Image (cartoon, rainbow, N blue to C red):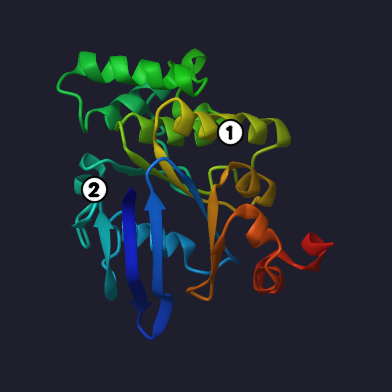
Amino acid sequence: MSLIDVKDVTMRFGGLAAVADVSLVLNKGEILGLIGPNGAGKTTLFNVINGFYHPTKGDVYLKGKRVTNLRPHVLCKLGVARTFQVVRPLQRMTTLDNVIASAFIRAKSKTEAQEVSLEVLKFTSLYDDINVLSKSLPLGKRKRLEIARALATQPEIILLDEAFAGLNPTEINEQIDIVKRIRTERGITILIIEHHMRVIMDVSDRIVVLNYGQKIAEGTPSEIGHNPVVIEAYLGEEHNA
């Protein structure tokens, strides 16, 4: 069953088409990777899907219902959460309070919000940092906090925007494990933007490739890894070798 259908979406800024007639389907229970060069339109497409941008043309459907132009907080209440490429936690608040603030989108009381948040912080291995100010966390933990804040909204779908950028090899492996468990243990469907090819090939069931705002390929990780158009536009001959 498809959860998100993006149909012929175009997003123009003045005369520039950052996204041009892109369609994709995110099926329930899968991890769909979204890759492409810098400036290919990946984050712009995310911003259309979760309501930050109103598309110039095209529509977004959530479980068959048109949700084009709904505000981000409305889509979050409908089950669509996201993280951001540049993490911006509430710096003067503790790790726990950052997550509690997100949990209130569904929680009816502070007690409920705290219970949800503590469980999420255990899941993301941040429980030992609950009283640490978020601005004091190293990058790897701030990336995990971004995921924890999204999970605290109790989503059905999560959009991950470069959740691995800037991480060291150990942190990458820990983050891969968390992303896989988000799907297997929590049943959450994932759409992920990532430049780290080992990550995207490892976690994704399917991959969509954008270049200059257009979709140039779609397929399994193996199919994408051997696609000559993708190799020329993004992966490079060293990947083929």
**Which residue is at the front of the view, 128 or 7?**
7
Query: Is residue 130 shown above or below 148?
Result: above
Q: Is residue 230 left or right of residue 145?
A: right
Cα–Cα gap, marks 2 and 1:
25 Å
Q: Which mark is residue 175?
A: 1
**Which residue is at the front of the view, 172 or 135?**
172
Q: Which mark is residue 75?
A: 2
The residue located at (34%, 21%) in the rendering is: 117
Query: Is residue 3 shown above or below 213?
Result: above
Contact between marks 2 and 1 (CB within 8 A): the answer is no
> Label 2 crowding class (10 Å Cα cut-off): few <14, some 14-19, many 20+?
some
Q: Quadrant of the C terminus?
A: bottom right
Outermost residue, right side:
241
Q: Which mark is residue 5?
A: none
Which kind of residue does numbered mark 1 sit on? Gln
Q: Is residue 142 left or right of residue 48?
A: right
The residue located at (22%, 46%) in the rendering is: 73
Q: Is residue 29 visible?
A: yes
Outermost residue, front side:
1
Q: Quadrant of residue 230?
A: bottom right
Secondary structure at badge 2 equals: helix
Secondary structure at badge 1 equals: helix
Total numbered labels placed on residues in the image: 2
Query: Is residue 164 shown above or below 62?
Result: above
Q: Position of residue 222 (x, y in %)?
A: 67, 55
Which kind of residue does numbered mark 2 sit on? Leu
